[in-house]
Amino acid sequence: MGMALPPIIYEDDALLVFDKPSGLLVASDRWDKRRENLMALVHAKLGHGVANVHRLDADTSGVLLCTKTKAALDFLSGQFQAKTAEMVYHALVAGAAAPDEFTVELALREDEGRPGLMRAVKKGGKPSVTRFRVLERFAGFTWMECRPLTGRTHQLHVHLAASGLPILNDVFYGNATRLLLSGLKRGYKGRRNERPLISRLALHASELTVTHPETRERMTLRAPLPKEFTVALKYLRRFGEA
């Protein structure tokens, strides 16, 4: 049978936009070809005319844009290459950001010691720029808006980790920090097997703004915050004041 397709945020004759769940690859994995991926599901159910315009990391959830025609794919791919497609991510990070707004410019290249992962380098990497804005501050955590101006692999992970603000539950670039209710609520006795409020990577692609390939109008596609995030933010607002 296979998995069902993720929720569809928007669809017309040219576009098909999914709210991709965390844990699902967009395309086949170069290390493990047997892992389930979104485009294989899409092609099995909707045919090979549907193509993904961009990618999200497997553990990142949110807006994923696909097209139904070659003309739409070419038009939208051009926007990603020209950097006129605007992505907005939300991240819960471990640590406290110093300024309310800051920009990180760090070149990235593949980490020779860890194939498939990236690292920041002074020379020889691909230029990478992200704008960050603090939305809310909590004790030990910060809720942030991230706007990548370039689209490098793992860009937000590396830029945040290099800023001393690793994304919560980032197994490759982060630390062992966990968000537990017992750590927020005074006098709350956590069970021995207490589950974190967020157990997945705390990064979500909330918005994508592009020019529609047929109408030529700017449009913003939005994926709602996952329930885990809204619940965690509720507890942080109630008990986790900075």
Image: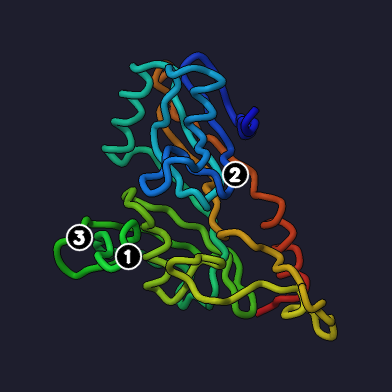
What residue sits 40% from the left and 16% below the top? 69
Can you say which quadrant of the picture contains the N terminus? Answer: top right
Residue placed under numbered mark 1 in the picture: 114
* Residue 193 falls in image quadrant: bottom right
Where 139 falls versus 88 (above or below)? Answer: below
Indicate the amino acid at tag 3. Gly
What residue sits 45% from the left and 49% below the top? 57
**Distance in Å between CA atoms under marks 2 and 1:** 26 Å
Residue placed under numbered mark 3 in the picture: 125
**Distance in Å between CA atoms under marks 2 and 3:** 30 Å
The answer to whether mark 2 and mark 1 are in CB contact below 8 A is no
* Residue 240 falls in image quadrant: bottom right
Q: Position of residue 21 (x, y in %)?
A: 59, 44
Dot 2: few (<14), some (14–19), or many (≥20) neighbours within 10 Å?
some
Task: Name the residue at the bottom extreme.
Answer: 187
The secondary element bearing badge 3 is classed as loop
Indicate the amino acid at tag 2. Pro
Residue 35 horizontal side relative to residue 241, left or right: left
Where 78 falls versus 135 (above or below)? Answer: above
What residue sits 71% from the left and 65% below the top? 197
